[in-house]
Amino acid sequence: MGNSKGFVEIQFNWIFVLIIGGIILVFFIGIAEKQKSVSEGKVSIKVRSDIKTILTGIRASTDTASIIDLIGKEISYNCEGYSVQGINPTQVGISFSPSKIKGFKVMAWSKDWSMPYRVSNFLMVTSPDIKYIIIGTSDIARELNNSLPPNFLTKGNNKQTLLNKELSGDTNDIKNDGNYRVRFVFFNHNPTGSEGLSNINSMEDSEVSAINIVGNSLEGFGELKFYKKKGNNWENFPHSISYYLGKESLFAAVFTEDYKSYNCNMQKAFKHLSIVSDIYIRRTNSLVRSYQNAGDTTCATQLLLSLESIEGIKTNANKLVNFFPSQPEIATIFQRASELRSSNDQIQRLSCSEVY
């Protein structure tokens, strides 16, 4: 009887030890997980801060394409900015990117958007692991390919992939090279059925997208149609028709797979255009008064023509801040910018003070 009682006590002691041991183990595992989470959070915050610092520097330098080294953290992007692991996004001016950027390197490219005076720098950010396939043999397709950053950046003996782009005359030649995303660029051609998808059908729908650029010039304005892969076929994004105005916004559309992010950032761009136009309106009014007071009707008259063009640009830019995309306003801004460019050239020939 005594032995039986002792055996039960031993069993109870072991059970008690196991329970306490388990609680202690769970406690320390929890601390370790929390410490890991805190550590990862600190790294993500630092990466986010580094991204803002680096991209802000690149954005300030026009026509600059650079490679940024990261530590492999996935970057999410939308109109609110760039985010790492769900941390509050950081905005870097007017920027355009795919929704996910993965890998250890990032390509950033800055272009000056002018209409016709300088408005803002557009920043385009992507990954060398995303493949961009420009379809066609037309002059405008070749011009786009040549206008984008080169495939490689060489520094001394070091050669790095800058932009993973390809010009292809036949969609049947498209191969799956293991990229985590593929972006097709068509010109004046709506992709139908499984066009270009036969060799990349194994990729997820979210990993393949396309854009159709409807226009005859990179410098002008035109229509944009956004597409996504759905199974073995192409599908239009609902209400996805938008517009580009100048080649910089066309480049931006190439890098932005989500038409909502593109439209949102273009609204920001038109807000900048309105603000800058207001500055030029005040400056031109001042010049007009100066020439009128001096009795110089030639310069005053020419400047009044320029003033009318700037006011037209501002009026339509204001409309697009809330209602972009809208084709009539895009066309009017392009026309007014062309008129202002000609008027400013004439002002220069007359030896009057230039508008911009």
Image (cartoon, grey):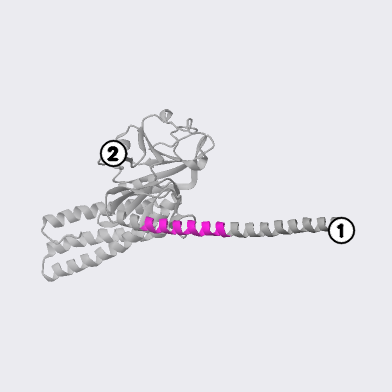
Of marks 1 and 2, the one in the foreground: 1
Callout 1: helix, strand or loop? helix
| Residue 294 placement, left or right of 315 | left
Crowd tier of the residue under label 1, counting other residues whose Cα lies within 10 Å: few below 14, some 14–19, many 20 or above = few
State which quadrant residue 82 falls in: bottom left
Residue at 39% from the left image edge and 57% from the top image edge:
267
| SS at badge 2 | helix
Tell me if I can see residue 95 in this picture: yes
Q: Of callouts 1 and 2, which one flags the residue occurring earlier in the amino acid sequence?
A: 1
| Majority SS type along the magenta span | helix
Q: Nearer the viewer, residue 19 or 8?
A: 8
Q: Mark 2, residues whose alpha carbon is within 10 Å: few (<14), some, or many (≥20)?
A: few
Residue 322 % position (x, y)? 42, 59
Query: In this picture, is 141 found above or below 25?
Result: above
* Camera-side residue of 255 and 34: 34
Residue position marked by numbered label 1 in the rendering: 2
Image coords of residue 243 (percent x, y): 38, 48
Q: Determine the image quadrant of residue 51.
A: bottom left
Q: Amino acid at mark 1?
A: Gly
In the rendering, at what x and y percent does residue 69 appear?
A: 36, 49
Q: Which residue is mark 2?
A: 146
Residue at figure coordinates x 78%, y 58% from the top left: 12
Image coordinates for residue 215, horizontal then vertical, percent: 34, 41
Q: Are discs 1 and 2 less than 8 Å apart at CB?
A: no
Q: Is residue 101 magenta?
A: no
Residue type beneath disc 2: Asn
**For the N terminus, which image quadrant?**
bottom right
Q: Give, as a single range, the part of the protein colored magenta.
A: 31-52
The answer, for residue 91, to whether it is visible in the render is: no
User: Foreground: 82 or 51?
Assistant: 51
Residue 51 highlighted magenta (yes or no): yes
Alpha carbons under labels 1 and 2: distance apart:
93 Å
